[in-house]
Image (spheres, helix red, strand yellow):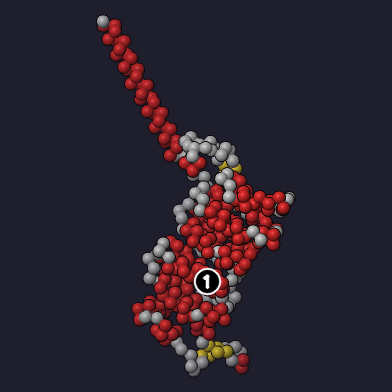
Amino acid sequence: MQGVNMSASALKDLNISQSADLEKGKDNSVKSCISKPVLNGSKRASKEENAPSACPDVGTNGNEAGNADVEYIDSENLVDLPDVDATLSTLVKRLDSKDWVMTCEALNNVRQLAMYHKERLQELLEPLVPLIVKSVKNPRSAVCKTALMTCSDIFKAYGDLIVDSIDPLLVQLFLKASQDKRFVCEAAEAALISMTSWISPSVLLPRMQPYLKNRNPRIRAKASVCFSKSVPRLDVEGIKEYGMDKLIQIAATQLSDQLPESREAARNLALELQVFYEKSQASTSGENEGEPSVAPEAESWEAFCQSKLSALSAQAILRVTSTTPKEGVAAGVTSAPKEGVAVGC
């Protein structure tokens, strides 16, 4: 009887030990899943390697795509396609594929076509843009970043020709440029820089203006930055045509925004407008070797602000423009560079 009791006790201890080991194994499995590193890309050509996961991938319903490499290729390193017709014939289908690696390859094909065969690709832009937007919204970072790089190349290739299709892209670019994942944010910033560099401000500004009142403060902030960076690229006639009074009202509104990024953009815009306004109010005399002299009927900047804005808004604008150094501001009102309009991540 004693031997039977000892056997039962030993069996109980063994079961407890096995249960503990099993629980420990589960804990380790969960930890390995949680601590799985996030894969980041770089600005230059790089690869995102996808090794078999220690836990099922939620985005693929537990089915891994295997050991796939996604290469981020800089625009200057893109080469021509060996068979353009074959690529074009399957492009739309591959962009809409559930195979994310195939989608990335198709997005890179779009970039190649935009660079080397822009006339052929232009015929497909209408059905392609919604698919590019879909890829930008893709939760898989590799697809999202490749789509953002595609946006940059399309803006450069087509400029004003793409503006009629840009609305669904804008909100996604503003959102991605304000997210926490750094390498996606940087790709979105690059796309916004390309957009503000290659699309004429006269057609781009009206497209961006509605986003200055968006409910999402992050969207408003990125829209404000892009808006303020685009205004200096207008020439004198462009600013007059858009409306100086409309622009100063936009600056005054953004000065009271909740995000510092919006307020800083508004301050920069106000300074740009002040310099432009004071230059436009001055007349140049040829006899005085181009020295400006203020016309008798010229209205002061202070008077202009007070005539176009409420008392509080005018006070806010005048406070900014009277206390902030204006050296170097608005130097590009009539000769802004074509590229390199920084947006800031």
Which residue is more in the foreground, 178 or 101?
Answer: 101
Q: Which residue is drawn at the image coordinates 73% and 50% (left, top)?
A: 82
Label 1: how many Cα within 10 Å (few below 14, some 14–19, many 20+): many
In the drawing, does residue 26 fall left or right of residue 284?
left
Q: Which residue is drawn at the image coordinates 61% and 93% (left, top)?
A: 287
Residue 188: image x %, image y %?
53, 58
In this view, 285 is above or below 145? below
Residue 232 visible within the image: yes
Q: Which residue is drawn at the image coordinates 57% and 42% (left, top)?
A: 49
The residue identified by callout 1 is 205
Residue 72: image x %, image y %?
60, 50
- Dot 1 lies on which element? helix
- Image quadrant for the N terminus? top left
In the drawing, does residue 290 fall left or right of residue 248?
right
In this view, 60 is above or below 169? above
Residue furthest to the right: 82
Residue 225: image x %, image y %?
48, 67
Residue 23: image x %, image y %?
37, 28
Q: Amino acid at mark 1?
A: Leu
Q: Which residue is drawn at the image coordinates 38% and 71% (left, top)?
A: 256
